[in-house]
Structure formats: structure tokens, C-alpha cells
Image (cartoon, rainbow, N blue to C red):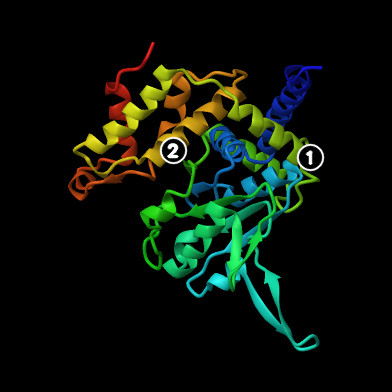
Amino acid sequence: MNETATTQPDEAAAREALGLLRQEVSKVVIGQDATISGLVITLLCRGHVLLEGVPGVAKTLLVRALSTALSLDNKRLQFTPDLMPGDVTGSLIYDSHSGKFEFRNGPVFTNLLLADEINRTPPKTQAALLEVMEERQVTIEGTPRPLPQPFCVAATQNPVEQEGTYPLPEAQLDRFLLKLTIETPQRHDEITILRNHNNGFNPHDLAAAGVRPVAGAAQLQAAQRAVDKAQVADGVLSYIVDLCRATRQSPSLALGASPRAATALLAVSKAWAWLAGRNYVTPDDVKALTHATLRHRVLVRPEAELEGITADDVLNSLLATVPTPR
């Protein structure tokens, strides 16, 4: 039997499982379909995601529901001003019985790490995640310790509070594949949320809410392999490059998208196309993920910010002016 014949059923099963995954999370996270899809894309691309939204829009519930539906381990780490790097990665602890130092795992040793309010901890502790996110390992005293696979950091930050926060530097932001902005639900969705709570919904008991495991690491890995094989025409590759180069030439931006940003946009476009049931990427796939991929990788000039211009505004303008391949 040839390779195509053996992999096609796996790919079909993986696509069905990932579709069911989004449905399961939607049972408890109402009105956030785009954010749920963004998290799934992040996992398909083996990346990390930054979730920005005001308190109370179900950021924590979203990650917990996703890990439950995927049968993956998850941990939540509340970032505070007094949090130390060892509290994130783990540290060597002296064992008086053995007379030796033993490594005690930190919360990063999980599949899905919810880094809650990451901008509330000092840069030294933020930097502890750099190796974790890039190399997927923790190095203590020269000894690397690999993290479980799959591994994804879902970090949250509040867009309105400034006092007592430490904005993430560009190098740290660039480690996040996507930055997803979680909006307040629409009125009808908010009514549904209240109705669920009125009927006894407990966000701490997802099993009672009907969230069940519908996929696992095997299906996710099969999906990742299928996404890697998605076809991208030269015209679409050129379009991605032209968009990123246009950000570097925009008078409203002090910092444009790097070549790494272009590779990220390529990866998420392939994942979006695959979720849509295709094994090839179109320019519309690129457009659909441009904002989430680039908004945190560009820097708006101060004078443009004073005029009320945001990164999304600049990206809207570029999407309207950069020629789209046929």
C-alpha cells in the first residue's frame, strides 16, 4: 500500500477531530469562534498565542476547555510582580535525605500553559519563558530538560491597565505566533451566557457542562503533518512577502514585520486553509490571519498613535493597497 493511501484516512480523521474540538469548546465559551479557531491554528503550527482582553471574557475558561477537549494536561500560572524565574521553569532543591540537589519541575512542564497576566511580572521573569517558548526546554545548571509535547503557551494581558505592568519587549512578542484580541460578546451571546449560568453552569466543572475529549495528541500530530504539506503557489508566497515589506515602508510604523513574521504568516495561512478543507493556500487565507499574525510584530510611531492610528488600521490600509495575486 502506498504512502498516500495510508495517510489520507489519518488526515480525514484528524480534520474531523479538530472540527469537533472547536464545537466542544464552543459549548462553554460563547461568541468567541474566531478566538477558538485562532487557538486551534496555534496548536496546528506548534506555536504560542497572546490573548488580549478585559477581565471576564473567558480567557482562562477557553484554555481549560481546549485542553479538556484535546485530552491534554494544562496548568495556570498567575504572573505577579514578585514572581521569580524559578517559579516558572522550576529549580534545584536540596534533598537532606539524599544529600543531593534534585530538580523540581515548574509549571511549564505541561502541554498547555496559561500564563495569566504576563505583563504583570518584571522583565527578568518574562525572559524565563524565552528559552521555553523557542527551544521547548528548560536549562538549569547546564542541563537541558525537554518539555512535554505538544507544548503551547497561551499568555493573557489586560489592554486597559497600565499601572504596575511591564510591557513585553519586541523580542518576547515575536515569540508569539498570534495575538488574538478577545472582544466582549454580542448581546445575544451574552444573554446565552447568562442563561447557561442561570441553569447551573459551573465553569469549574467542564464535564458537567458537557465538554468531552474528542481528540488527542495523535490526531493533533497527524493534523500538524497534513498542514505542513499544504501547497503554496509562488504568487501567494510573493503576496506574503509584499505585505511584510510594505509594513517596513509604511510612514505610520517605526518597526515593520521581520522575515520571521513572514514565515509565521505562511504557517498560519496553511493551517487556516487546511481547517477549511483545502490542501492549498489562497490569498484570502493570508488576509484572514494578517492582523492576528502581524499586529504585535509592528510598532506604530508615537505621532501616529496620537492621531488614533492603531496597528490594525495600518494593516487594513496595506491589505487594501498591496496587489492581490489572481
Q: Residue at x 65, y 77 (%)?
A: 92
Q: Earlier in the sequence, mark 2 or mark 1?
A: 1
Tell me: residue 324, above or below residue 295.
above
Badge 1, how many Cα within 10 Å: few under 14, some, many 20+? Answer: some
Image coordinates of residue 202 in percent, x first then y, are 73, 50
Q: Is residue 312 above or below residue 98?
A: above
Give the CA distance from mark 2 to mark 1: 29 Å
**Disc 2 element:** helix
Residue occupied by mark 2:
293
Label 1 secondary element: loop
Front-most of residues 33 and 118: 118
Q: Quadrant of the N terminus?
A: top right
Q: Is residue 127 left or right of residue 210?
A: left
Q: Is the residue marked by circle 2 packed among few (<14), some (14-19), or many (20+) residues within 10 Å?
A: many
Foreground disc of the pair 2, 1 = 2
Q: Quadrant of residue 190?
A: top right
Give 317 or 233, whichever is nearer the viewer.
Answer: 233
Q: Amino acid at mark 2?
A: Thr
In this rendering, would 151 be left or right of 269?
right
Left or right side of 273 for 161: left
Residue type (three-letter) at the residue carrying disc 1: Pro
Query: Which residue occupies 76% across, 43% down?
Result: 209
- The percent position of residue 246, horizontal first and vertical second, equals 27, 31
Residue 122 visible in the current orientation: no
Q: Quadrant of residue 21?
A: top right
Q: Height in image: 217 above or below 107?
A: above
* Residue bearing mark 1: 213
Camera sees residue 228:
yes
